[in-house]
Amino acid sequence: MSKEFVRRTSSGWVALVLLVLATIADGTAIEVFIHRAALAHGDGPVLWLVVPLVAAGLVLALLIVLWCGFFTLQPNEAAVLLLFGQYKGTVRQQGFHWANPFYTKSKISLRTRNFNTDTLKVNDKRGNPVDIAAVVVWRVDDTAQASFDVDDYRDYVHVQSESALRHLASAYPYDTSADGELSLRGSMDEVSHGLQQQLQERLTKAGVVVEEARLSHLAYAAEIAGAMLRRQQAEAIVEARMRIVDGAVGMVEIALERLERGKTVELDNERKAAMVSNLLVVLCGEQAAQPVVNTGTLYS
């Protein structure tokens, strides 16, 4: 596995001043040699000027090559340096730089990026098809791994994100009524944390850090959405009824206890059963109870 290390480069402004001075000096030398050659042309051979003129021309060619060593880096941008296929380090400092002109410079953005995965149809833990999508926030941390250990780190992030999302969706049910069981809909924070961990394990090879991963879309697939909606409604009604019954029973118990404690009225078992029945009807009924006035006794 590749490992990034920082390469220090020369200041571009210092190199610019030096190259400008060297280019002016070399150009002046060439002009002087040409002028002398022109003056001495009528007096005889000028072979003694050929060698310094050629040397000045070679220096000019070298200066032209050196001028190709300048490059700039913006904030949160890095340059990976290669020399004939060999990794020579990464420049991370922003600004104007000069380096060996034979370096191949590949710039990589270090900024935080995010993308929304496509909506995927996946079977949850119970086999129900669900539509799911996620938002992934990531950035490049190791430029050497991103450049050399994977073919295309952007495509690698996208493919691995969809793979991790599919794996996560199949590990949880869409919804659950059991206490302590995690679900995609009811445990969003835990599920998102699990997705981030899975992505980080997969993307470490590419030198990528996952800063956040959250579900952005979650719904039953269209073919079962109607049936699942009715099931959820039925479960909600049953749960509501259970709470109503529990509350009604508690209220009846409190009423009987207070009547007995205060000795407001003495009730035998049959009268208690009738009172309990009436109170449960009143408390659990969906419509308002219609009072019935009993002018006789319970036994007539």
Image (cartoon, rainbow, N blue to C red):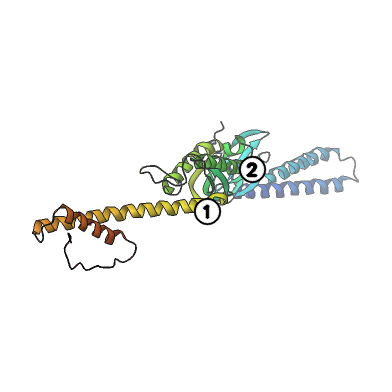
Q: Nearer the viewer, residue 101 or 167?
A: 167
Q: Is residue 205 left or right of residue 44?
A: left
C-beta proximity under 8 Å, tags 2 and 1: no
The Cα atoms of the two marked residues, 2 and 1, are separated by 52 Å
In the displayed structure, 8 sits above or below 255; it is above
Identify the residue at horizontal 80%, vertical 45% (top origin): 33
Identify the residue at horizontal 13%, vertical 58% (top origin): 258
- Check disc 1 and give the amino acid type: Gly
- Check disc 2 and give the amino acid type: Ser
Is residue 225 among what the camera can see? yes
The residue that label 2 is drawn on is 106
Q: Earlier in the sequence, mark 2 or mark 1?
A: 2
Tell me the quadrant of the picture where the C terminus can be found. bottom left
Instruction: Kindly state the secondary structure of the residue where label 1 is placed.
Output: helix
Where is residue 122? Give x, y as percent. 55, 43
Identify the residue at horizontal 26%, vertical 56% (top origin): 248
Where is residue 224? Give x, y as percent. 54, 49
The residue that label 1 is drawn on is 226
Is residue 141 among what the camera can see? no
